[in-house]
Amino acid sequence: MIGARTSASARGLGQGQGLLRGASSASVASVSVSATGRGRGRSLVVLDAQRRHVVMRGITAATTTALALVAFGGYLGLRPKTNLVANAAAAEQGNQGGIDGKSSLGYALSMSESEVKEAMKDLNDLQVSVTKGGTERAFTGKTVNGFSHDNKEDGVYVGAVGGLPLFDSKAKFDSGTGWPSFFMPIAPDHVIEKRDNSIPFMPRVEILDAKSGAHLGHVFNDGPKPTGKRYCMNAAAMKFVPRSEFEKSNE
């Protein structure tokens, strides 16, 4: 999952550059005022302005480079390597979370290799690619049952492979990134956090489905209150279940 809010960041950069231009104008004004003083004072102001300009240009360039790496990393093949069968087998063997392989909400947290392979047969090529570590294009994603990335209906998002409840629509927010974003999972033990070093010099935290081991997306520390987290997910890795249907299935 791309690690930055591309459009919002671009606007932020534009505003920052506007501030830099304002700062440069202020420095020039300072130089003009200093011109009436001693020549030495004027020289110090000029040198200081030049030094700040060089430093600010360096910071702006570094930020732009970082954003570019995040924005295009997924499309250049820089993606985490997710082996669903291996992850599912590890979950089955390790009994992740809860008691007797059950989550804090009472859901099974493991799948056999044969169950994973069978579930994958119902997914299209894009959905398979995403669950194995790929990334859907921003603003285009749809859940496996056809709900748009910006769906605003009330309900629960479950895993496309194992059906484990992952995120509640009550925790969903508009991040402006073009991917479904949530500030918390439906239960902490329903997702797995894994370090992702697929983009050089930019470590991220990958989010996996705790039952099937499927890749879901990434989590970042730039979300809203109360958690400050942004779980940036791929719609194609999930299925949306309307609230009434979800509650009925759990009766």
Image: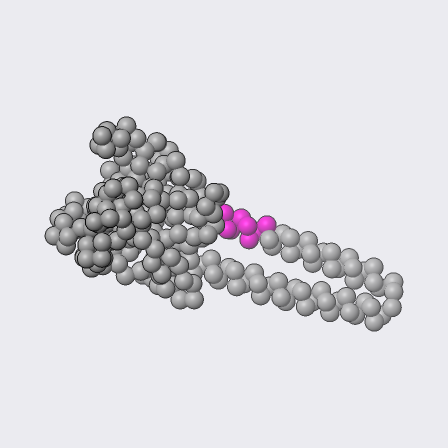
Q: Position of residue 209 (x, y in %)?
A: 28, 50
Name the residue located 71 percent from the left edge and 64 percent from the top edge. Answer: 49
User: Is 62 placed above or below 186 here?
Assistant: below
The one nearer the camera, 212 or 101, is: 101
The one nearer the camera, 214 or 135, is: 214
Figure quadrant of residue 168: top left
Q: Quadrant of the C terminus?
A: top left
Q: Is residue 216 visible?
A: no
Q: Position of residue 249 (x, y in %)?
A: 22, 32
Q: Is residue 106 visible?
A: yes
In the image, is 15 to the left or to the right of 189? Answer: right
Residue at the far bottom in the pictured view? 40
Name the residue located 28 percent from the left edge and 51 percent from the top edge. Answer: 97
In the image, is 213 to the left or to the right of 121? Answer: right
Figure quadrant of residue 204: bottom left
Name the residue located 18 percent from the left edge and 50 percent from the top edge. Answer: 111
In the image, is 110 to the left or to the right of 15? Answer: left
- Indicate the colouring scheme: one colour
**Total numbered labels:** 0
Name the residue located 44 percent from the left edge and 48 percent from the top edge. Answer: 229
The one nearer the camera, 152 or 183, is: 183
Q: Position of residue 212 (x, y in %)?
A: 22, 51
Q: Is residue 11 magenta?
A: yes
Magenta residues span: 8-15
The one nearer the camera, 178 or 101, is: 101
Q: Is residue 96 magenta?
A: no
Q: Position of residue 88 (x, y in %)?
A: 20, 55
